[in-house]
Image (cartoon, rainbow, N blue to C red):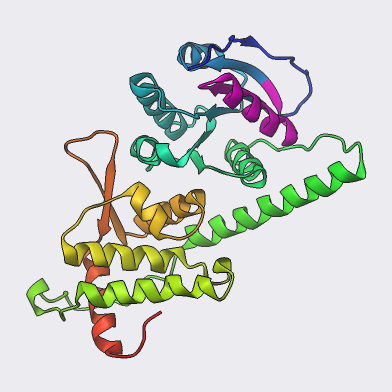
């Protein structure tokens, strides 16, 4: 890991939200600083992972923490994530944790149930959107810096539109579907229709084939793709880690993680810690979700399900 000099940043005493940056390398630090500055926030201080916990204890003015990780830092990273998860849940500050796909399981295992904004291999609009959402959760206004050119203005409008789109999506998801009507108790599992793994695999393959003929984002439906993948795994008696489910969702990992959090919150998915690996979490269908999917496949019969 590269050595990062901890200390004060070039502080501007404006009313822009102050952000504490911690990173696993100099390159990661530079990228995080660029995002914070593009967002119109000010950098309160920067530090490496080895000193960030001490800095958090002393940093009384920071609105949010931006944690940029480009490599697996092992136990120090795990301990830091546990603290961030606890601090954010307690309302001490907001936080964004940015990582790459190789870190999905290790990060999600520590942050999956918190209000931390977790982003994976995110582009710049997604990064700025995540920071905007984190800052808004801290109940402080986010202010954009003055625009010095038409090019900057266009870029900021694009980022603002992305923030609005993601915020609206999250708000809609948090509402959730209307409560279902009261139903009789579900029958025992042995009374459920049989669904073969081959049937589910054929549906998944058909969905992926559409990308040969049309842009894949035209049919993005991560909730359904995750449902199908978990049903296939359940039938085959396989366990699905978070990283694998993100791939099955066929959308950017950050988007998949937000959908996963929503599906868990709605009671449709269940997260289970890997008893042999504290840095991995498995996901499975909740019993009522499994029952509903099996009845759905039985009802549609031979009709193509895509």
Does the segment drawn in magenta span residue 156?
no
Which residue lies at the image location 64% right of the left edge and 29% below the top edge? 31
Count every numbered label the image shows and give the total.
0
Classify residue 161 as left or right of residue 106.
right
Which residue lies at the image location 74% right of the left edge and 14% below the top edge? 10
Q: Quadrant of residue 264?
A: bottom left
> Can residue 20 be seen here?
no
Which residue lies at the image location 58% right of the left edge and 39% below the top edge? 134
Above-or-below relation of 166 to 102: below
- Locate residue 78, reporting x and y percent: 36, 26
Span highlighted in magenta in the image: 21-43
- Locate residue 203, reporting x and y percent: 35, 76
Quadrant location of the C terminus in the rendered image: bottom left
* Identity of the residue furthest to the right in this view: 149
Does the segment drawn in magenta span residue 29?
yes
Above-or-below relation of 91 to 74: below
Which residue lies at the image location 39% right of the left edge and 59% below the top edge? 248
- Locate residue 151, reporting x and y percent: 87, 44
Relative depth, front residue between 168 and 273: 273
């Amino acid at each position: 890991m590269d050595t990062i000099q901890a200390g004060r940043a070039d502080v501007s005493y404006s009313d822009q939200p102050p952000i504490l940056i911690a990173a696993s390398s100099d390159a990661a630090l530079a990228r995080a600083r660029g995002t914070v500055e593009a967002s119109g926030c000010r950098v309160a201080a920067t530090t490496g992972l080895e000193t960030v916990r001490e800095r958090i204890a002393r940093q009384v003015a920071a609105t949010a923490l931006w944690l940029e990780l480009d490599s697996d830092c092992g136990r120090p990273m795990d301990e830091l994530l546990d603290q961030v998860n606890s601090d954010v849940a307690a309302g001490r500050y907001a936080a964004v944790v940015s990582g790459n796909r190789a870190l999905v399981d290790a990060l999600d295992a520590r942050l999956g149930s918190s209000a931390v904004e977790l982003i994976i291999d995110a582009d710049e609009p997604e990064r700025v959107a995540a920071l905007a959402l984190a800052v808004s959760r801290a109940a402080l206004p986010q202010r954009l810096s003055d625009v010095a050119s038409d090019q900057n203005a266009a870029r900021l409008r694009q980022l603002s539109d992305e923030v609005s789109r993601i915020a609206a999506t999250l708000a809609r998801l948090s509402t959730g579907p209307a409560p279902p009507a009261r139903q009789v108790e579900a029958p025992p599992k042995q009374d459920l229709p049989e669904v073969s793994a081959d049937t589910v695999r054929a549906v998944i393959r058909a969905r992926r084939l559409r990308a040969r003929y049309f842009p894949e984002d035209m049919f993005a439906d991560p909730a359904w793709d995750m449902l199908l993948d978990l049903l296939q795994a359940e039938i085959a008696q396989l366990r699905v880690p978070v990283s694998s489910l993100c791939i099955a969702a066929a959308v950017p990992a950050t988007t998949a993680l937000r959908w996963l959090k929503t599906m868990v919150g709605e009671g449709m998915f269940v997260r289970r810690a890997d008893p042999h690996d504290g840095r991995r979490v498995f996901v499975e269908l909740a019993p009522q979700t499994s029952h509903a999917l099996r009845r759905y496949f039985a009802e549609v019969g031979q009709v193509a399900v895509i």
